[in-house]
Image (cartoon, rainbow, N blue to C red):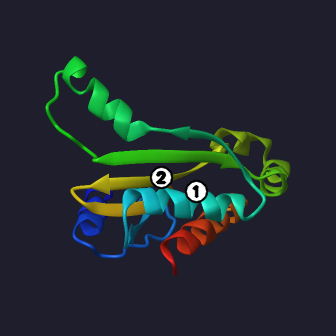
Amino acid sequence: MVRSILLAAVFGIATSVSAGAEEAYTVHSFEGSFDDATFSVESAIVGRGLVIDYVSHTGEMLNRTAADVGSEVKLFEAADVFLFCSAVVSRKVMEADPMNIAHCPYGIFVADRDGQVMIGHRNYPEGAMQEVQALLDDIVREAVGD
């Protein structure tokens, strides 16, 4: 499933995957550069009064360490993951089930694969975590201009 989502994104198909046990990710194509996409995601997160705790430069790490792990495959031109939390939403989902702490912080990724920029997030389980799912969907849709 993830491979088909990535392929759809690489070939310019806007892909939105609904949450479910078999669906791990939601991915949307972004019309623009990687830098524009990261700016758009950052703006959408901060614009909601949320604080970005960390930006993982996953693409840089994968490119830098490829030879060290015996690989010549370049997975991404660039890829970042924005990690953040929402005090309001996190409190609600953790009051519903304190073990929802396992899902925090929340992440939105931006990746450039073969010139196709995509923005997405993992999908969350049914129940209280669907509030987080909705928050991430809203942020990603704003970032891609939907």
145 shown above or below 26: below
Tell me the residue that label 2 is attached to: 109
Q: Mark 1 belongs to which amino acid? A: Tyr
Q: CA distance from mark 1 to mark 2?
A: 15 Å
Q: Is residue 23 visible?
A: no
Where residue 84 appears, x then y in whole percent?
67, 47
Where residue 75 appears, x then y in whole percent?
25, 44
Badge 1 or badge 2: first in the primary sequence: 2
Q: Residue at x 53, y 59 (%)?
A: 39
- Residue 81 lies left or right of residue 34; in this view the side is right
- Residue 4 lies left or right of residue 33; in this view the side is left
Q: Mark 2 belongs to which amino acid? A: Phe
Tell me the residue that label 1 is attached to: 124
Badge 2, how many Cα within 10 Å: few under 14, some, many 20+?
many
Question: Are the residues flagged by discs 1 and 2 in contact, CB closer than 8 Å?
Answer: no
In this view, the residue in front, 56 or 123, is 56
